[in-house]
Image (spheres, rainbow, N blue to C red):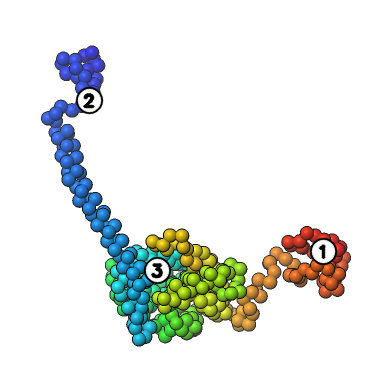
Amino acid sequence: ASALGGAMGGGRDGSVTAGREPAGSPGLRRRIRDAQERAREAPKAFVKAGSKRFQDLRDDMKCLGTMWLKGSRGSDHQERLESFYAPQAEAYDRFRSSFLWGRKPMLAACAARCAGMDKDGVWVDLGGGTAENVSMMEELMDLSKFKKIYVVDLCPSLCRIAREKVKEKGWRNVEVVLADACTFKPKEGSASLVTFSYSLSMIPPFNAAVDNATEWLREDGLLGVADFFVSSKYDLPLRQMGWVDRWFWRSIFDLDNIDLGPERRQYLDYKFNRIYEYNGRGSIPYVPLLTVPYFTWVGTKKTLEMREADIEARHRRPMAFPPTFIYSLSWEDPRTDEPVLQVGPGDTVLTLTSGGGNTLELA
């Protein structure tokens, strides 16, 4: 027992204390003080966390109230923007982070294509708001690759937040400009990257904004766009949606002077060579079940030949196919196909979505 008591911290009487410290030891007193301090701080931490959650909820309700109840008012576009964003400018970034789902993927697509760019690049973010796009881009690439970054917006309240962010982050190559996206021109005369992040739908003369960007975008430059959208009645399959979606989302956003019409992307397709596109749906804060449609789109300047060609003409056949003729319609009577197709020895016929009867008749 004495041997066991020595190993376990027992006393001379052979009792076992299992390594526990005497009641008056400094280590035990220190742990008691620490526990008491944590107990005193716990209510404060709980209150602080609760206060932060309450503040976030209050800010979110302010954003939602402005969007759904107050709307925008004013005699011109700038006044309407200011009346809409001024009440929610301070809470803009946090709320939009769980709403603007296409923003970061669009920036990532642009950043991947700017990886080999030299350090004299110029990025112009038209409708850049609070410069949050610059914060996101900083996570994706080295901002020093841009000689200059312009954050252009027509809303004074959002520009104020953007300038505070630029100062806080210490970005020396970022300039916030209160200006119209339809008339702004970079001092350098050209830009290697232009982005519209959820701003093209809020620019009534969107054609003028796109034309303006086209003028000073370099020949090898990129244009990136992310926004909400609705399709046209007859659209590309990757964009197509039913009439309920088209009517509902366009009507809802129209209340805040946001136009989701398909003509914006159609004009992008007309002016630029589309190299990347994704169409998806994202959740809306505090709105269960509903998901809003959004897209990301990246394009380059068209050559003269591209301007003369329809966008779908460039996808007439897969690149792996030899020069051939794709006959997209099949009549029930193959005898009417024979004089048109003129299939003969040495020809190869690939038939899709067919039971095979017409193809065997051609053989």
The mark found on residue 133 in the picture is 3
Label 1 – label 2 distance at C-alpha: 90 Å
Q: Residue at x 45, y 82 (%)?
A: 204
- Percent position (x, y) of residue 188? 41, 81
**Farthest left residue in view:** 24
- Can residue 116 be seen at all in this image of the molecule? no
Q: Is residue 104 left or right of residue 58?
A: right
Above or below, 363 against 215 in this view is above
Above or below, 196 against 115 in this view is below
Q: Is residue 319 left or right of residue 262?
A: right
Q: Residue at x 24, y 20 (%)?
A: 7
- Residues packed near mark 2 inside 10 Å, few (<14), some (14 to 19) or many (20 plus): few
Element carrying mark 3? helix
Q: Residue at x 60, y 81 (%)?
A: 307
Element carrying mark 1? helix
Above or below, 201 against 322 in this view is below
Circle 2: residue type: Gly
Circle 1: residue type: Asn
Q: Which residue in the structure is indicated by mark 2?
A: 19
Q: Is residue 246 left or right of residue 131?
A: right
The C terminus - image quarter: bottom right
Element carrying mark 2? loop
Answer with mark 1 or mark 2, whichever residue precedes in sequence.
2
- Percent position (x, y) of residue 171? 33, 69
Q: Which residue in the structure is indicated by mark 1?
A: 358
Answer with mark 2 or mark 3, whichever residue precedes in sequence.
2
**Foreground of the two, 273 or 225:** 225
**Farthest top residue in view:** 1
The N terminus - image quarter: top left
- Can residue 133 be seen at all in this image of the molecule? yes
Q: Residue at x 48, y 71 (%)?
A: 249
